[in-house]
Amino acid sequence: MFWFFAAILVFASLRVITARNPVHAALFLVLAFCTSAGIWIQLEAEFLGIVLVLVYVGAVMVLFLFVVMMLDINLTRLREGFWGYFPVGAVVALLLVTEMALVLAGPYFGLTEAPPPPPSPAGYSNTKELGRLLYTDYVYPFELAAVILLVAIVAAIALTLRRRKHGKRMDPAQQIRVRREDRVRMVSMPADKGDQA
Amino acid sequence: MLDSLLAYPQALLGPLWPVVWTLVKIMLIVAPLMLAVAYLTLWERKLIGFMQIRIGPNRVTFFGIRWLGGWAQPIADGLKLLVKEVVIPTGANKFLFVLAPIMAIAPALAAWAVVPFSPELVLANIDAGLLYLMAMTSLGVYGIIIAGWASNSKYAFLGGLRSAAQIVSYEIAMGFSLVGVLMAAQSLNLAEIVKAQQSGAGLFGWFWLPLFPLFLTYLISGIAETNRAPFDVAEGESEIVGFHVEYSGMTFAVFSLAEYAAMILISALTSIMFLGGWLSPFPASWGILGASSFGWLILKMFVVVSLFLWFRATFPRYRYDQIMRLGWKVFIPVTLVWIVVLGAWMQTPLWIWWK
């Protein structure tokens, strides 16, 4: 099972960077998220797995796709800058490779292998434990993160909000409050006698 | 009885048995569901017909039997769509174009895995059932985005963006109403949520009463989430830029199947989370009427689904900016306020929905 998910994950991640069409790349990223959620669930981290699907696949990637689809990305223009960015990219890649090597070759560098976690008791709920920890031991970091996110939301909205000068924006509350008297004027007119002919 | 019956195939298939048995169980859910979807379309046309003093479909029948008039209509419709040509637009991405309807219907079916039909009868009794449901319903939006993009049409693309934005917005309000449910039930497991609503008070012990604003929000967001009238801008005649304008034949039919399956799913979830699931509305002393059973769940789902149809027959379509306003400026504040009220309420002795 693990190898099955891992194979899909590796394939999808490779396609994310090799796919020519940016929308395809984004969709492969979705696939990669879904398979890694599957692997996490196998590791008994079902809360994290489901939340990965819920947040990243269900919300973040949707918005990401929106942007990628609406941008008119010119591939040849992108290629032009390739050699300019190459040194920076190479340094980052090297750093990443080193980090991965350190993790993978942990025993070689004197890292003692961590013992496998003890099997969880029956009735153990991953979600409940996480919630308990977040709201007791880690409540201040948690709240801090929440406040930072809130500030980010407010800032993003403030930066992009602009009112159109001559927009025909309607106020629904006003529309609902409208009464017949404001719109229609009843005029009483004498009936036509009909004797012109 | 069942165990002895199953012993033979179990021995025959050996290690493959769990896979086969799970597939059988999935079929036992999906097949009646598809049948229900087919007859929901008939019920929709009939019910709206009654409301508009018409008769509705009454001609297509099995083997020429007069009094079955109309009952074969869904099957005739399905057959017609099945043999119609699937037009794939020029320049469309073929793979994604065909994948989109599948992406739309798959989450609506996959979500049924955690829906409990009775205390024991559930395919996967997972602890984080409510989270799983939210994850599945949030996946449904991909069908729409991919459909809009893969059609290679500006109208479909704009329609896809619009519907996707609508669904993503209403998902937030839905998620917040679910937060209220899990606070009241103290569990994410759907069977536990139903059990938390069990009390001596019959239907007054269910969560619709203490969570009334959340109940309404969930129901209305559910309608918006499934792209039903009055939020069905995807198929509005006056502004016809739905995400599925380029779809025809069976690919289009799968989109409608997904819509109706999602409707039944939302009604099942509303029944389970707010209307007591399989619990009886009557006191336990009423004999068979007071006993909790699968039938009550079906009855509640039927009532909620009929509400969907009733709304369709009653309300004019929302304008798009009003849809977004309702979701963001009305529902989300309502749910947020009620979650705080609920949190405070549960700390006081006035909270009487304790197990």
Image (cartoon, coloured by chain):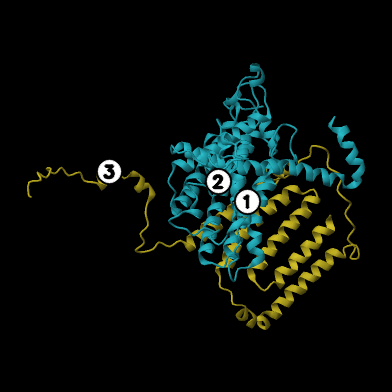
Chain colours: A yellow, B cyan
Farthest left residue?
A196
Q: Nearer the viewer, residue B156 or A84?
A: B156
Q: Dot 3 falls on which chain?
A: A
> Relative to residue B278, is residue A100 depicted above or below?
below
> What residue lies at 60% left-to-right and 54% top-to-bottom?
B81
Amino acid beneath label 3: Arg
Q: Which mark is residue B173?
A: 2
Q: Nearer the viewer, mark 2 or mark 3?
A: 3
Q: CA distance from mark 2 to mark 3?
A: 34 Å
Disc 1 with disc 3 on a shared chain: no
Q: Residues within 10 Å of mark 1 (few under 14, many from 20)?
A: few
Q: Which mark is residue A180?
A: 3
Give the x, y percent position of residue B93: 63, 68
Left or right of A149, for residue A90: right
The earlier-in-sequence mark between 1 and 2 is 1
Amino acid beneath label 1: Leu
Q: Quadrant of the C terminus of chain B?
A: top right
Farthest top residue?
B285
Q: Residues within 10 Å of mark 2 (few under 14, many from 20)?
A: many
> Relative to residue A93, is residue B159 depicted above or below?
above
Q: Which mark is residue B79?
A: 1
